Structure formats: structure tokens, C-alpha cells
């Protein structure tokens, strides 16, 4: 039997259950594009109608995951570079690539946030996402500038390149079942779907070197 959350703590736990279910489904199904509210509520053990008490839409649920992804990326960069100093541009770029690749769900969500997620929620939720993501962004810029030899403007450009490349390359490297089958039949077309992290690292290192 599905039970309704009565206390604030229970309601928060239900929301966390839904987020955990969405994470698991995205990993199992091959990306967030395959996640549905019906599947999320079933996996979380909630009645399909209950999800609206916690998230107004699938977009709001996924935007919450993206917001948390920014915080985790910032934490990852800070942990990766703790105590580092005078990193070369190539070393800074490699750290950016490593910390992004360590968060597959976030890499996937970077494609969907500007396309649909942040534009399909109400303005207060969009403002909250922007506030949190920009705070994380500023923290990442500060860490990369403090630990390396790139200027703040150069780091801004590097992160801009990293976000754009990640959003594109992640999808290419994780094709749908149809495209995966096509690439088996036509291997020459599969070059765009090669290993994500090595390609991202090479491109970001070239970008960082060029910027400096």
C-alpha cells in the first residue's frame, strides 16, 4: 500500500526517494531522456499521483538533479586540486575533464538543462537553479585560478568550452540502441562515439593551451 508522507521529514525522504529512483533509472535506461515520471514513482514505491506533491513535473525533478550535480562538481574540483599550485594549463584542463567524467549523470543533464529543463519550470525554481549553479561555477573558477597559472578570464573560457563539449560528446559517446546497432554495421561512422573522457581531455588541453 502506498502511504502519504505526513511529516516534513517524511516528505523530504519521499523526495529523496524519487531523486534516487530517477538517478538509477537514468543509469539503467541509457540516459535521462528515457526517464518518465511513471517509472520514477513506481521505482520509488509511490502512487503515480503522489509525485506532484514533491515535484511539479519531470523537468523540475531533473533540474534538482542538475543543481546537485553542480555542487558535486565543485566539491570534486576542490578535492581533486586540494593543495595543488602552479598547475600548467594542460594540467588544469585534465582536472576539469576528470572531475566532469566522474559525474556521468551530470554530464548527461548538461545537454538537457538549456534545451528544456530550466525553461519548463516556474520562475522561482529557475531562479533557485541559477543561483545555486552560478555559486558552484564561481567556486570552480576560484579553485582553478588559485591552483593553476591560467587567468580568471582564461578559466571562464575553459569552463565554457568544457560545458559545451561535455554536453555534445556525452551524447555521442552514449548512443541510443538504434545508433549503437548502426555503428556495429557501419564502424566508420562510430568515430564520433569514441571514448568520452580521453577525447574531452585532449580537446580541453588544446583549448587551455591555445587560451594561454
Image (spheres, rainbow, N blue to C red):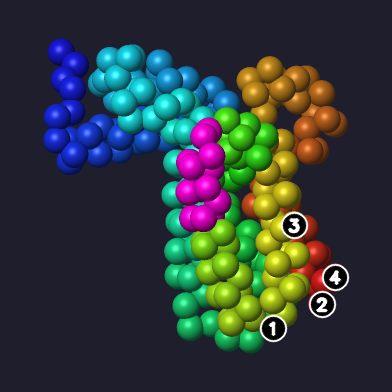
**Residue furthest out toward the front:** 123
**Residue furthest out toward the bottom:** 86
What residue lies at 53% left-to-right and 39% top-to-bottom? 123
Q: Which residue is mark 2?
A: 212
Label 2: few (<14), some or many (≥20) within 10 Å? Answer: few
Q: CA distance from mark 2 to mark 3?
A: 14 Å
Label 3: few (<14), some or many (≥20) within 10 Å? Answer: some
Badge 2 or badge 1: first in the primary sequence: 1
Q: CA distance from mark 1 to mark 3?
A: 18 Å
Q: Which residue is mark 1?
A: 149
Image mark for residue 210: 4
**Disc 2 on helix, strand or loop?**
loop
Expressed as whole percent of the image width and height from the top left, the position of residue 82 reads 47, 78
Residue range of the region highlighted in magenta in the rendering: 121-133
Badge 4 or badge 3: first in the primary sequence: 3
Q: Mark yes or no: residue 153 visible.
A: yes
Residue 107 appears left or right of 156: left
Q: CA distance from mark 4 to mark 2?
A: 5 Å
Residue depth check, mark 4 versus mark 3: number of the one nearer the observer: 3
Image mark for residue 78: none
What residue lies at 74% left-to-right and 57% top-to-bottom? 161
**Disc 3 on helix, strand or loop?**
helix
Residue 22 appears left or right of 126: left
* Whether residue 129 is situated above or below residue 120 in the rendered picture: below
Expressed as whole percent of the image width and height from the top left, the position of residue 106 reads 53, 45
Labelled pair 4, 2 in contact (Cβ < 8 Å): yes
Q: Which residue is mark 3?
A: 161
Expressed as whole percent of the image width and height from the top left, the position of residue 93 reads 68, 67
Amino acid at each position: 500500500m502506498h502511504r502519504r508522507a505526513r511529516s516534513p521529514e517524511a516528505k523530504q525522504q519521499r523526495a529523496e526517494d524519487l531523486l534516487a529512483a530517477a538517478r538509477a533509472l537514468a543509469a539503467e535506461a541509457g540516459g535521462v531522456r528515457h526517464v518518465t515520471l511513471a517509472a520514477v514513482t513506481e521505482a520509488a514505491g509511490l502512487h503515480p499521483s503522489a509525485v506532484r506533491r514533491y515535484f511539479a513535473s519531470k523537468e523540475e525533478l531533473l533540474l534538482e538533479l542538475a543543481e546537485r550535480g553542480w555542487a558535486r562538481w565543485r566539491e570534486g574540483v576542490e578535492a581533486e586540486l586540494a593543495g595543488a599550485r602552479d598547475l600548467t594549463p594542460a594540467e588544469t584542463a585534465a582536472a576539469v575533464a576528470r572531475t566532469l567524467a566522474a559525474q556521468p549523470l551530470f554530464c548527461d543533464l548538461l545537454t538537457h538543462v538549456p534545451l528544456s529543463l530550466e525553461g519548463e519550470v516556474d520562475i522561482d525554481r529557475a531562479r533557485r537553479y541559477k543561483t545555486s549553479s552560478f555559486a558552484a561555477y564561481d567556486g570552480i573558477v576560484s579553485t582553478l585560478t588559485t591552483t593553476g597559472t591560467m587567468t580568471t578570464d582564461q578559466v571562464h573560457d575553459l569552463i565554457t568550452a568544457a560545458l559545451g563539449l561535455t554536453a555534445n560528446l556525452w551524447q555521442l559517446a552514449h548512443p541510443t540502441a538504434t545508433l549503437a546497432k548502426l555503428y556495429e554495421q557501419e564502424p566508420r561512422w562510430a568515430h564520433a562515439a569514441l571514448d568520452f573522457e580521453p577525447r574531452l581531455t585532449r580537446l580541453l588541453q588544446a583549448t587551455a593551451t591555445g587560451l594561454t
